[in-house]
Amino acid sequence: MGLRAYVLRRIGQLLLTYFVFLTILFVLFRMMPGDPTSVFILEGLPAEAREERIEELGFNDPLYIQYFDYMRQLMTGEFGDSIIYREPVVNIIWDKVANTLFLMGSSLILAYTIGILGGALMGWYRGTRFEKIGIVGVLTARSSPEFWIGIILLSVFVFWLGWFPAAGMRTVGLDSGEGIWRFLNRDFLWHLFLPMLTGAIFFTATPALLMRNTMLDVLDEDYIEVKEAEGLPERRILYRHAARNSILPVVTVLAIVTGAAMGGSVIIETVFNWDGMGRAIVDAVNRRDLPLAMAAFFIMGSLVIFMNFVADIAYVYLDPRVEYE
Amino acid sequence: MATRTRPGWRDLPEKLSSGSRWIAGKFRVFEGDRIGQTGLVLLFGIILIGIFGRPITLDLFGMSQTLQPFSLAPYDPSVSHRGPDGRLLRLEGPSWAHPLGTNHLGRDVLSRVIVGARVSLIVGTIAAFMAVFIGTNIGLTAAYFGGWVDDVLMRITDIAYGLPFLPFAIVLLAIMGQSIYWIIFAIVIILWRSTARVIRSQVLSHKNRPYVESAEAIGASNLRIMYIHILPNVLPLAFLYAAFAVGYAVIAEASLSFLGFGPPEMISWGGMIFTAFNQDAIRQAWWWVFPPGLMIMFFVMSVFFIGRTLEMVVNPELRHRE
């Protein structure tokens, strides 16, 4: 099978997976106890108004019509009105998406930088004390749930040293500017540091261990020995020849790790009170805000599925030796 | 008279015993491997805490039988303690009577940490083994039959990969109610996927080997080839994945409990930290937060350390991902 055919087939599979995902989402949220009008009872609205609202939302239609409506609404980005915020979900969700992407994006960049460098060194100094300590350190970080890492960082850097704020994204009342400057200012980065570090510590293990493993393979290759015989300085061989040839598998799992990070954001955002999608989904489910919960779930799932797809395609593009199966 | 052949099932004990001998032989790899040994010691300690934490009694047909009378926990974990003046001992720091202090309801933290081991042990092992059992069977079936069977099963695996764990589990628990069974179910639904993929690729490489072809040639049934000939060869890999899966399952349960989706009456390490966090007690009551957090970490470390040692033996080529 050629590359083109493979990619086409993979796109077909992507569509199928996505379709099933959307259907699971529909089934889950139709099973959720309480309906979007429950809030009207609390407000003491007359039963007629409630009936009218149910009719308007289409809950009296046959299930298959509801299903088609639901698909059409998702595709056009109509998520309904949030019960918590009392305004359309579209107005608030994209801000939260940006906040989550900013947090997890910076976390992953940091995790990958540390992981690749650390993994390369662990592979290079194989069999030494340094490697052993590195492996124990990485496995320990991977063994700690994100909320535990977050709480340790909070205890040390906030409660003890008092260097960073405990929660939130911005100092209240501080004017932080517009557009991209809302993110690129000192106050925001100061708030970002601990949650970002939490994610980075947790996600470092995957690139570090993978990098070490491929380094071990690469270091066995003949050309490394040739380079050594040529008398090149050690550092040059490490970075220019060994590490560079080991990096491919690490890059291809980046997409998968990015997908997994979506789930991780739920915990980190809860610990640090970060106003992203992860915290939104917890709040929304707890307060039965179905439209908001569904929108957050929909966006997170879409990102995960898309990143898995990118991982597969990147893999065959980057590595010519791969067979398309 | 034709030579009599032994019925197929007769081989099974032999295969199983050779499998367990294989594993026993592999335990030798822990010799000289400090990391793996540390893992074994930690795991053993936590299992002991789980078994001897509180007495275990079994109620059968109205008869109550004590299986294990010993109690490591100094107090009943749900009793609120009061001082000599009758005042509730709220958020008291460590003392001789309460080595890890008390929580906001005056309950002994040490006892709760000890009892909490059970939830992690039960959820971790049951969820991991169910996930690996399902994953192994799906991977084996998909690879062995190939064609449309493979296609269908692998598409299902793709879908499992498309579900983000925490959002899915939260919504599921909101629908089904917060019980330990649904927590295990949610974990299993997500966790089987990596085993399925790895076992499938492993079986694919075994499928065309001579031993399978000769089994086919003498007319062995599909099931027999799959489970008696191929499975023992991929079982070590499944064991390895089970070790890592225990770690993931424990983290998953702790995370769900930390978010407040565990059953309210259940004592779990993640749940303790959730309560402390919600009571705004993490700033001063370190004795309430750090012990359960460390226990979660030690438990997961133990299986990851053991897994790493097994990994070097089972398949040096294998890269562990996720």
Image: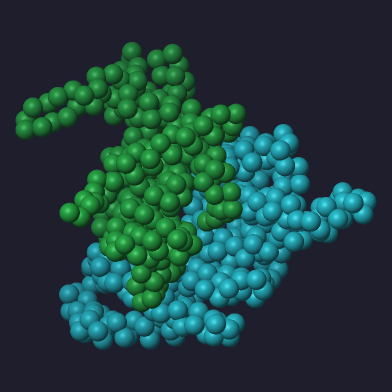
Give the chain ID for the cyan colour.
Answer: A
Q: Is residue A52 left or right of residue A235?
A: left
Q: Is residue A280 visible?
A: no
Residue depicted at x 81% and y 55%: A224
Q: In this view, which residue lies farthest toward the right?
A: A231
Quarter where residue A171 is shown: bottom right
Across the whole image, how many numbered discs are drawn on residues?
A: 0
Q: Is residue A313 left or right of residue B105?
A: right
* In this view, B58 is above or below A85: above
Q: In this view, which residue lies farthest toward the left?
A: B61
Residue depicted at x 63% and y 50%: A209
Q: Is residue B51 visible?
A: yes
A184 or B28: nearer the viewer: B28
Quarter where residue A111 is shown: bottom right
B137 or A48: nearer the viewer: B137
The N terminus of chain A appears in which quarter of the rendering? bottom right
B251 or A209: nearer the viewer: A209
Residue depicted at x 43% and y 63%: B207
Q: Is residue B72 left or right of residue B43?
A: left
Q: Is residue A87 left or right of residue A126?
A: left
Q: Position of residue A184 (x, y in %)?
A: 71, 64
Residue depicted at x 23% and y 52%: B3
Q: Colour of chain B?
A: green
